[in-house]
Image (cartoon, rainbow, N blue to C red):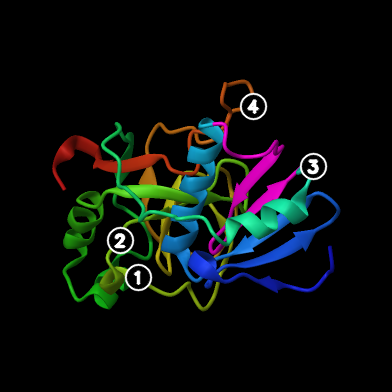
Amino acid sequence: MSGAATALGGHGSERVVLPVGRHGLLIELPGAEAAEAFHAEVLRRRSAGLLPGVTEIVPGARTVLLDGLAEPRRLAAEVGEWEVPPLERGSESAVEITIRYDGPDLADVAGMWGVAPEEVGRLHAATSFRVAFCGFAPGFGYLTGLPEEYHVPRRSDPRTKVPAGSVGLAGPYTGVYPRSSPGGWQLIGTAVGTVLWDAAREPAALFAPGTRVRFVPEGGTE
C-alpha cells in the first residue's frame, strides 16, 4: 500500500483512508459526528462478525484507527462503500458524575454564555453527554453533547497545574481531569467522589467511547 492518502468514492466520498504501517488504517471523517457514527458502525460490524480481525480500534476527534489487520488493502477498498447510519443516541443507562459547580472559570463561562453564573450548572447538568473518544491522559474522555451556542474556547493562558477531578470545557467538549496536570480548559466545577482511572479496577477507565454521562449537581439543588 502506498504512503499516500487514498480518497474513496461512493458512500464514503467524504472518507479518506490512510495506511498506518503494514497492518493499520486511519480513516479520516469530515467531522466529529461522522467519526462517532463510523466508530459505532465499526463496533457493530465487529460484533456481527463482519469485520476482519483487528487488534485495536481507536476513535479520535475526526478519525478512527484500525490496527492489526491482516489485509488492510482489502478493507481500505471496502470501507468506502459502507452504509453508515446516523449516530443513535441510545437509551442505555448513563454514568452519573456528582459535580460541585465551583470552578474558577465559572464566571467567565457564564459571561460567554450570556447567563448568570448559577445558570451554568443548571444548563450543564441538563445536558446528556456521550464519550466521543479518549486520550490526553489515562481515563480522560472527551464528552460531546453541549449545544453549539455553549461551546467555549480554551483559556488563552493555560494553567500549569489543574487539580484532579476538575471539570472543564473546551470547544465542543466537556472533560474531567483524572489526575493533576497542566491544562487550558475552562474549569466550571469539581467531580466529587469520582475515580476515572484505577489500574486495579476492571475496566480501569470509567469512561469508554460511547459511554453516556450525566452530571448530577451535589445536593441536587443547582
**Discs 2/4, front:** 2
Distance from Cα at disc 2 to Cα at disc 4: 30 Å
Asked where in the image residue 212 lies, by quadrant, the reply is top left
Is 20 located above or below residue 157 in the figure?
A: above
**Discs 3/1, front:** 3
Mark 2, Cα crowd under 10 Å, few <14 / some 14-19 / many 20+, is many
Q: Dot 1 lies on which element?
A: loop
Answer with mark 2 or mark 4, whichever residue precedes in sequence. Answer: 2
Q: Amino acid at mark 4?
A: Ala
**Discs 2/3, front:** 3
Is disc 4 in contact with disc 3, using a CB cutoff of under 8 Å? no
What numbered label is drawn on residue 70?
A: 3
What numbered label is drawn on residue 199?
A: 4
Answer with mark 2 or mark 3, whichever residue precedes in sequence. Answer: 3
Q: Amino acid at mark 2?
A: Leu
Asked where in the image residue 117 lies, by quadrant, the reply is bottom left
Residue closer to the observer: 56 or 159 = 56
Q: How many badges with numbers are in the image?
A: 4
